[in-house]
Image: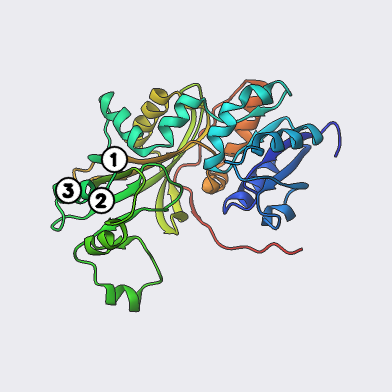
Amino acid sequence: MNKSSLNILITGGGAPGAEGIIRCLREIPHVHITACDKNSEAYGKYLADAFFVIPDADESTFIQSVLSICKEMQIQIVLPLVTRELIYFSRALSLFENESVKVLVSNLTSLTIANDKGLLYQTLSENGMVSPDFKRVKDFQAMKTAIMQFGYPDKKVIVKPCVSNGLRGFRILDSNIDELDLMLHYKPDARYISLQRLEDIFAHNAIPDYLVSEYLPGEEFTIDVLAQNGKVLQIIPRLRLETRGGISTRGEMIKHAEIIHYVTQIIELLNLSWLVGVQVKKAVDGIFKILEINPRVQGTTVACLGAGINFPRLAVELALYGAFEYKEPQWGTKFFRHWNEVYY
């Protein structure tokens, strides 16, 4: 490692989006990338310049382990890729600052709201902003009552944990699903469920806090944002044309004024910083409403390279130099994402 290099640490070296983030960071001159993951054979091990195994985020040694890596590798910037790690990093920001390390993560209050969909929807509603119609429930009977109140079985209804990652725990209740058709003609997809199936699972088991909410049938957008203390500096909405396992595989960069205004208001209200991902979807009435916030760099943000915007590089430069120069994206850029291999 050259002492004159810019030393960056990314967590989640085995995350689906790690390759794309590393590719973005490679565009920074003299960069030296250290990756870490709880899995000793995370594929990022073979893409980064150095690799370390770290404990799970909720283990007591997590922060100290990352701090030790920062000291050993003379890290200047930490870029977390794992949602579960964010709260722990935010609580320990002063420890990293004492070692002259900048962790690109929002403040604790902002993260607490952004990571809890129930609290997020409630916060938006209380501040006069649009959010899906929802009800927060803590047991199956309350869940079942809310599902019926949202129009089931005549209407589709969404249930999802207030705190989760990816599509874990997310289900669409649809009384018209044909399980034989799903079995014979579709690849395995656990998104759809009947009320009876849901009752079989939850009726006699404790459940975490859940959201029951209206089903949004329209177009879905992922929005990449670079922000600083609630001020949006760069923003790109991406229309999700195809997805796989909740991850965008085909899309288009669209300068959508309504979405840009809506997301800008949300970022300002929550006082979020650094790289943030927001998901919105069109409701029956044609209004876009929030699905969730990922208050970290998104794996699919690499797609924005095609529109001329390197979000990870911009965030690193902002952290180092405190300056930012807006660049207009190449709107209308379309992209495909596909599998690639790592050999070792």
Between 104 and 257, the residue placed more toward the observer is 104
Give the residue at x 42% y 28%.
267
**Kind of residue at disc 2:** Phe
Image label count: 3
Give the structural element (helix, strand or loop) at label 1. strand
Q: Is residue 188 left or right of residue 83?
A: left
Q: Is residue 163 left or right of residue 273?
A: left
Asked whether residue 232 appears in the rendered view, the answer is no
- The location of residue 215, given as percent across then percent down, is 24, 50
- Seen in the picture, residue 96 relative to 278 is either above or below; the reply is above
**Kind of residue at disc 3:** Thr
Q: Nearer the viewer, mark 2 or mark 1?
A: 2
Give the residue at x 40% y 71%.
187
Q: Which quadrant holds residue 198? A: bottom left
- Of the residues under marks 3 and 2, which one precedes in the sequence? 2
Between 292 and 109, the residue placed more toward the observer is 109
Asked if the residue under mark 1 is in contact with the one under mark 3, i.e. CB atoms within 8 Å, the reply is no
- Distance from disc 3 to disc 1, alpha carbons, whole Å, reads 26 Å
Give the structural element (helix, strand or loop) at label 3. helix
- Seen in the picture, residue 39 relative to 276 is either above or below; the reply is below
Q: Which mark is residue 244?
A: none
Q: Quadrant of the N terminus?
A: top right
- The location of residue 79, given as percent across then percent down, is 63, 37
- The location of residue 108, given as percent across then percent down, is 50, 26
- Seen in the picture, residue 176 relative to 2 is either above or below; the reply is below
Q: Which residue is mark 1?
A: 288
Categorize mark 2 by other alpha carbons within 10 Å: few (<14), some (14-19), many (20+): some
Q: Is residue 265 left or right of residue 193?
A: right
Give the residue at x 73% y 49%.
48
Q: Which mark is residue 145?
A: 3
Q: Which residue is mark 2?
A: 140
